[in-house]
Every structure is written in C-alpha cells, then in structure tokens.
C-alpha cells in the first residue's frame, strides 16, 4: 500500500524582491563580503596559535594577541552586519531569514566576551583562557556553517540570475 504525498512546498526565498534590491544597493553588502573571509582567515591563524599553546605551552603572547584580534574582527562584523540587516530588512538583529543565525551569534559574542573578561581580570589562568577561546571558536564555526548552509539553500531554492550577488554575513 503506497501513500500519495503532496509535494513539499518550496522553501520561502531568503529575500523578497525589495529586500534583494536593498541588499544589492547598500555598500554594507560589500563590507560584509570582505569581512567574512578576513574573519575566517584570522580565525584559522588564531586557532593554530591557540592549539599550539595548549599542546606545547609556547607562544602564549602570540595566541593571546590573535584571540583579541579575532574578537575585534568579530565585533566589527557584528556591528556592520547589524547595520546591513537594518538596511536590508529594517531591523538591526533577528530579521526573519536570519533569526536563528542571529540567536546563535549572540552565544558567539558572549563566549568571546567571556574570553576578554578572563584575560582582563586574570580570574582564569592562561590555559583556561585558551579553552574559553576554543569554545568561542567552536561556536563561531557552527555559526559560520549556519550562514553558509542558509545561503546555499537559498541559491538552490530559486533559479540563478546573472545579477545576483550572494554575500556571506557571518559573525
């Protein structure tokens, strides 16, 4: 016995026509498109330095500076991303298409802030600080994957158009 299932409705597009127009018109789209890979590169370098410190106890200063730089780049992309979201969707955070990505971004911000607090107060030793950084980096990697999957699904859900520019906005 087979059941006939109704075909699944296609997913809602990531952008309405008007949102796409605003996305393509704002300079913040380019800013996000530049900052996202910069942040990812800083993340990879910093991750290597943090792991080296945890494995060998060496290069603490380099690892510390790299985590601070990664955090500053994260804050920069979050502020500019909020401005982008406001221009495209009319809200600074939690726009319909990026609600869950933004929710998880708050966790990423909180973990990076916890690292800075541990560093500035000295309440946690260097190893503990680097473990907090690793937790922040794991959350960042998950959040970056959320955004990449969102944009990939959006590209698959509608026919490609030559004037489409898809920029990855990550924390």
Image: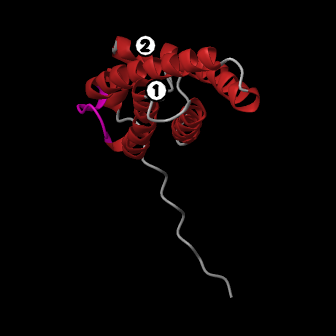
Q: Position of residue 160 (x, y in %)?
A: 56, 30
What secondary structure is found at the residue carrying circle 1?
helix
Front residue (pair 145, 70):
70
Q: Name which residue lies at 39% across and 23% down.
A: 75
Q: Which residues are magenta?
A: 88-95
Mark 2, residue position: 31
Can residue 37 be seen by looking at this rendering?
Answer: no
Packing grade of label 2 (10 A; few <14, some 14-19, many >=20) is: some
Residue 8: x percent and y percent? 52, 61
* 106 left or right, relative to 154: left
Give the number of the disc on residue 128: none
Quadrant of the rendered structure where residue 89 is? top left
Q: Position of residue 111 (x, y in %)?
A: 45, 37
- In this picture, residue 138 sits left or right of residue 102: right
Q: CA distance from mark 2 to mark 1?
A: 29 Å
Which one is nearer the viewer's eye here, 8 or 87? 87
Residue marked by disc 1: 119
Question: Mark 2 or mark 1, which has the lower sequence index?
Answer: 2
Q: Are marks 2 and 1 in contact (CB under 8 Å)?
A: no
- Which residue appears at 75% of the width and 31% of the height? 55
């Amino acid at each position: 016995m087979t059941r006939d299932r109704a075909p699944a409705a296609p997913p809602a597009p990531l952008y309405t026509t008007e949102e796409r127009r605003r996305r393509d018109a704002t300079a913040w789209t380019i800013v996000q498109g530049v900052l996202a890979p910069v942040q990812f590169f800083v993340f990879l370098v910093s991750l290597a330095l943090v792991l080296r410190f945890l494995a060998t106890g060496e290069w603490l200063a380099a690892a510390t500076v790299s985590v601070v730089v990664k955090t500053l780049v994260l804050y920069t992309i979050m502020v500019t991303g909020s401005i982008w979201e406001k221009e495209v969707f009319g809200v600074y955070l939690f726009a319909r298409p990026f609600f869950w990505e933004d929710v998880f971004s708050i966790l990423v911000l909180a973990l990076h802030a916890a690292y800075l607090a541990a560093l500035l107060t000295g309440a946690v030793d260097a190893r503990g600080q680097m473990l907090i950084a690793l937790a922040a980096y794991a959350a960042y990697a998950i959040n970056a994957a959320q955004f990449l999957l969102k944009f990939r699904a959006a590209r698959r859900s509608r026919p490609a158009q030559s004037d489409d520019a898809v920029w990855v906005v990550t924390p």
